[in-house]
């Protein structure tokens, strides 16, 4: 989903505020990966937050969103942190 260095707890909180579902995980490369699902406008809001705001004291070098597609139903019922 993104190449960010941020505290994923803030990402989880923001996802819940916006109203999207999915997951997020820190990678061994110091980036963040995940999946976001929900109404298009809410997913776009989350993508904007990930690209421009992030968590306090985060360093956003770049974002890379891929595999965007329309789905008929959500695969997740909430937003979670994976380890």
Image (cartoon, helix red, strand yellow):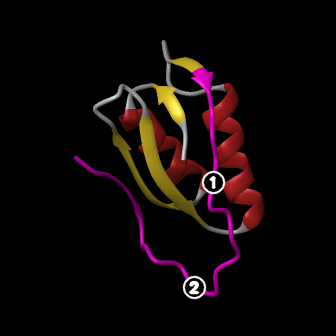
Name the magenta segment's main secondary structure: loop
In the picture as drawn, the residue positioned furthest to the bottom comes out as 72
Find residue 58 and report its horizontal and vertical position in percent. Answer: 49, 17
> Between residues 61 and 9, which one lies in front from this camera angle?
61
| 66 drawn magenta | yes
Secondary structure of the residue carrying tag 2 is: loop
In the image, farthest residue toward the left: 83
Q: Secondary structure at mark 1?
A: loop
Q: Earlier in the sequence, mark 1 or mark 2?
A: 1
Q: Residues within 10 Å of mark 2 (few under 14, many from 20)?
A: few
Please give the name of the residue rendered at 49% of the width and 57% of the height, measured from the top-left corner: 35
Q: Is residue 49 left or right of residue 40?
A: left
Label count reads 2
Answer with left or right where residue 49 lies relative to residue 55.
right
- Residue at figure coordinates x 28%, y 32% from the top left: 28
Residue 38 in the image: x percent, y percent? 62, 68
Q: Which callout, 1 or 2, points to the residue nearer the camera?
A: 1
Relative to 13, residue 28 above or below: above
Q: Is residue 18 left or right of residue 48?
A: left
Q: Residue at x 36, y 36 (%)?
A: 9
In the depicted structure, whether residue 64 falls above or below residue 19: above
State how far apart marks 1 and 2 are (Cα).
19 Å
Residue that carries the numbered disc 1 in the rendered image: 66
- Mark 1 Cα shell of 10 Å, populated few (<14), some (14-19), many (≥20): few
Q: Which residues are magenta?
A: 61-83
Residue at (52%, 32%) from the top-left corner?
3
Q: Which residue is mark 2?
A: 73
Q: Position of residue 77 (x, y in %)?
A: 42, 73
- x, y percent for residue 1: 54, 47
Question: Which residue sits furthest right?
Answer: 41
Q: Which mark is residue 83?
A: none
């Amino acid at each position: 989903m993104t190449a960010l260095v941020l505290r994923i707890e803030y990402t989880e909180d923001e996802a819940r505020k916006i109203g999207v579902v999915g997951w997020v995980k820190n990678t061994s490369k110091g980036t963040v990966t995940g999946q976001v699902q929900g109404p298009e406008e809410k997913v776009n809001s989350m993508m904007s937050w990930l690209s421009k705001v992030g968590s306090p004291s985060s360093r956003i070098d770049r974002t890379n969103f891929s595999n965007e597609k329309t789905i008929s139903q959500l695969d997740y019922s909430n937003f979670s942190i994976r380890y």
